[in-house]
Image (cartoon, rainbow, N blue to C red):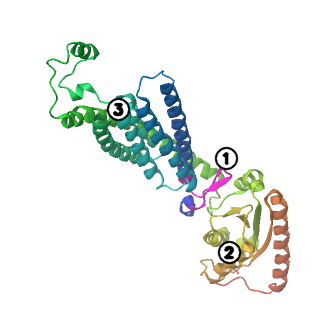
Amino acid sequence: MLFRLYYFRNFAIIDSMKNKTYNDPWDEIEARANNYSSQGLLAMVIVIIIAWALTVGGFFIIDIQLMTKAALIGIFGFLSLRALLRIFDNSKRWLKYPVLAVICIICGTIVSVLSFHAVLLYVIPLIFAAQYSKQHVIWCTLAFNTVIVAVSSLIAFYYGLCDLNIFFVSMDNYSHFTEIVQNGFAGLEINPNPTFIILAYATFPRAMLLALFAFMLSQITAKGRSEAAQLARTKLISETDFITGVFNKNKYAEMIESYYPKLDGVGVIFWDINNLKEVNDEFGHEMGDRIIIELAEALLSNAGKNCKVYRIGGDEFISVIDNPAPGEEKRLEKAILKTLSTTESKADATVSVAHGTARGKGVNITQVVNEADAAMYACKRIMKGENSEAPRQKPGKIQ
């Protein structure tokens, strides 16, 4: 069905923060998730700075040099990652994978410095992953994060803050070690294989807890994705012309009011099918619908990322270009006319299409549309004068 065919191609959502539209609803969802990740990275930096300040002030009893090292790693890493999200198009679906991988590495590096003081940072990458719509993102993050847990646990033991229960053959608490110290460490046995202890009794239990956490987050993500898909379908139905797949008059009115006035410039092409009523009367409405669909296909096939197509009446369409380059609307008009003239029509009637262009400032979008409309009617008068004797009943093309 044509309606389904143009689902991803012609769907657009307004991002009110950046005045940007997306042709794919999942691109909009991806962009929002990356925006949330960017905000989360800034929040991480703020928390790290607060923790470092409290340590320097003597509130946290942690070695200041180690804390400073961890803080610099976190601040530089998270801010660099935030800059990366701003440099690249945040609707790109590949972007989340390097972002999440780097978050795992940064969190693991901080834990390797601060050890058990920062062990909850292992959960942070999964929380970031849960913002994205695909469940496999959480499981991929879990797999990579588990490797980071093992590596950072080993680094933390040998180079970070040491956990005495790993270093010594013991499973005792603070009071036991206090007594040992008071007795001059008598009878305390050194663990000969701390690496195995770390992997078996530190990494594995943490990985199990992270897997459980990942499962819970994946269920939340699946529910959110289902609801988002339902909302996307509902929105699509409300703003798309069922027959052609282009935007309908409701979407056109929304964009005229809230989107185009914010642009620096717009280019408009007004299209009108001549004598469609006569075609419907003589050949039937099914034939008229075929002609309408073929025109819509030609408009959509030539529309770039910065061009949207609307059906605002039975035989009237408008192509609107965001911030067009000099002469872009004229070039698009010629390309569409060429497509119409070279594409074999399935309709058994030949009709002509009147067209007119105009360009101007976005804030004057209504005036620009009126100028394109006037140019279209001037074209229509000329075409009707030239083609008053032209036959309609023959296999052919939309002219």
**Closer to the observer: label 2 or label 1?**
1
Location of residue 292 (image quadrant): bottom right
Q: Secondary structure at mark 1?
A: loop
Q: Secondary structure at mark 2?
A: helix
Q: Sequence-wise, which precedes: disc 2 or disc 1?
A: 1
Q: Along the line of sight, which residue is nearer the eye, 385 or 129?
A: 129
Circle 1/circle 3 CB separation < 8 Å: no
Indicate yes or no whether the magenta region holds residue 229. Answer: no
Taking 115 as reference, is 382 above or below it? Answer: below
Point out residue 14 in the picture as x, y percentages from the top left corner: 66, 51
The stretch in magenta equals 9-27
Q: Secondary structure at mark 3?
A: helix
Point out residue 310 in the picture as x, y percentages from the top left corner: 70, 62
Three-letter residue code for mark 3: Ser
Point out residue 145 in the picture as x, y percentages from the top left corner: 35, 43
Q: Along the line of sight, which residue is nearer the eye, 171 or 374?
A: 171
Q: Sequence-wise, which precedes: disc 1 or disc 3?
A: 1
Circle 1 residues within 10 Å: few <14, some 14–19, many ≥20: few
Q: Residue at x 68, y 52 (%)?
A: 19
Residue denoted by label 2: 283
Circle 2 residues within 10 Å: few <14, some 14–19, many ≥20: some
Q: Sequence-wise, which precedes: disc 3 or disc 2?
A: 3
Taking 230 as reference, is 324 above or below it? Answer: below
Three-letter residue code for mark 2: Phe
Residue denoted by label 3: 115
Which circle marks residue 17 in the picture? 1
**Closer to the observer: label 1 or label 3?**
3
